[in-house]
Image (spheres, rainbow, N blue to C red):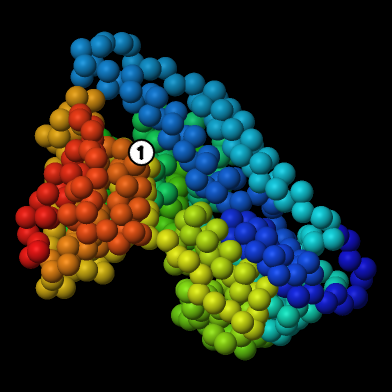
Amino acid sequence: MKNSQHTTRQVDVAVIGAGSAGLPAFRAARKHTENVVLIEGGTYGTTCARVGCMPSKLLIAAAEAAHSVEAAAGFGVHTSKPTINGEEVMGRVHRERDRFVGFVLEGVESIEEKHHVRNHATFLDDHTLQVGDSKIEAKTVVIATGSSPTIMPMFEGLGDRLIVNDDIFEWETLPESVAVFGPGVIGLELGQALHRLGVRIRLFGRSGSLKPLSDQVIRDYAVRVFQAEFRLDTKANVRGMQREADHIRIRFVDREDGIEKTENFDYILAATGRSPNLKGFGLDNTSLELDSRGVPVFDPATMQCGNSSIFIAGDVNNILPLLHEAADEGFIAGDNAGRFPEIKPGQRRSPLAIVFCDPQIALVGQSWKELEGQENVVVGKISFEGQGRSRVILKNKGLMHIYADRSSGLFLGSEFIGPQAEHLAHLLSWAHQQKMTIPHILEMPFYHPVIEEGLRSGLNAVNEQLSL
């Protein structure tokens, strides 16, 4: 909708951001009132569809196809080394990515024009937004502005040789080499995918962690698995980096021999976290209490910021940067914004996180960081190295820990790395949300021979430790 200059529009609910949280918030608010406006100052199309979940999985799928050719020799099937055409790989990524974005745009464009405002919004107070040359007065506001990659000071001066994950999906072809900083979800997924597509990579970390794992036994196992495939140092000693012509020169101490080395890379991929998109939104003009990151303090059950009429949802609140969590939070925030001042807690699903590396990493329910030190917690362990179906398909790398309450037998959570972890994680997340006990889960059917039998072995290992 086009706004006349210097006008003031009054609405019941203003939603800032038309992404994975903003769209559900808008739809939820409209169940209570038609006087809702969706404000977007950036590009339509969710982070997931444009530069996140979907294009990264397209790149990973290509990498898995290439790797399967190389892995065929383990079955006695010998082929020549795969020829990887970078232009064709990225061409498919672009086509399919644009298709997914197109679906999102269709959803946005189906919303009546009167509900759209294309401009940047700034708070003047709790109820007034400056949007371009106009003002919008809203009874309630939902902040759903998303997040952006964090660029650390150490990367200053690298120019266009420094990239973030967004930039990868605009490549026309694959480069020869990339140094990846940050062994978290993005760095691990993209780093391994690029390696399997023939790109020389080295993955640097600083803290020794391998996010999102908090169980050190699982983390250490995972690190060994990935180090056997590509160059990974989770506690790297980087001595310096500088731009030289069309490449970056990095000085670092090699973890294997302790010798300082110098290596050149076409690009540095900064995968060192994401920051909430809150700068320039005028939050200082509101009554909101902000935390140390500048994020409004809010109730995760209702998404309400303090006792105000402002709600916050999605990556911008910086707690669970996952599409399904953003959508759930958006619905809760929009529903409560629409019914304000009578708000209610929304339904939150059991925690579930999956990293699409190979082997995959998954976390379900409570993490070991939350449970460690609690006297009544027992741990069941299962290695996939000897698990039948996993060995049959040569995917027998993995280790799982299952956490349960000793007295009640309640399944509490799990952290693991293993084959088809995405599917095992879903089974466990359903069990966790249903508050099932370990004996109850063991009553469920397990076919033979399947990878899920490995899960059953882990459940049996827990069951033996229960005081039932």
Kindly identify the residue that appears in the image at 71 percent across and 85 percent down: 125
Q: Position of residue 271 (x, y in %)?
A: 43, 53
Residue 308 placement, left or right of 118: left
Q: Quadrant of the C terminus?
A: bottom left
158 or 59: which is nearer to us? 59
Number of numbered markers: 1
Q: Tell me if residue 13 comes above or below residue 468 in the rendering.
A: below
Residue lying farthest right?
A: 4
Residue appearing at x 79%, y 74% in the figure: 11
For the N terminus, the quadrant is bottom right
Can you give x and y, in whole percent of width and height, for residue 329 in the image?
Answer: 53, 65
Q: Inspect this view and state whether residue 204 appears.
A: no
Q: Amino acid at mark 1?
A: Gln
Rendered residue at 56%/68% (across/down):
332
The answer to whether 43 appears left or right of 356 in the picture is right
**Looking at the picture, how far across and down is residue 41, in whole percent?**
72, 61
Q: Residue at x 34, y 54 (%)?
A: 429
Q: Taking 174 as reference, is 215 above or below it?
A: below
Please, what secondary structure does the residue beneath circle 1 have?
Answer: helix
- Residue in the foreground of this view, choosing between 104 and 435: 435
Q: Residue 276 appears in which quarter of the rendering?
A: bottom right
Q: Is residue 420 visible?
A: yes
In the picture of the structure, the residue carrying the numbered disc 1 is 192
Neighbour tally class for label 1: few under 14, some 14-19, many 20 plus, Cα within 10 Å = many
Task: Indicate the position of residue 448 as horizontal and vertical percent values.
Answer: 20, 30
Q: Does residue 238 appear left or right of residue 294 in this picture?
A: left
Query: Quarter-wise, where is residue 148 in the image?
Result: bottom right
* Relative vertical location of residue 332 with respect to residue 107 in this rendering, above or below: below
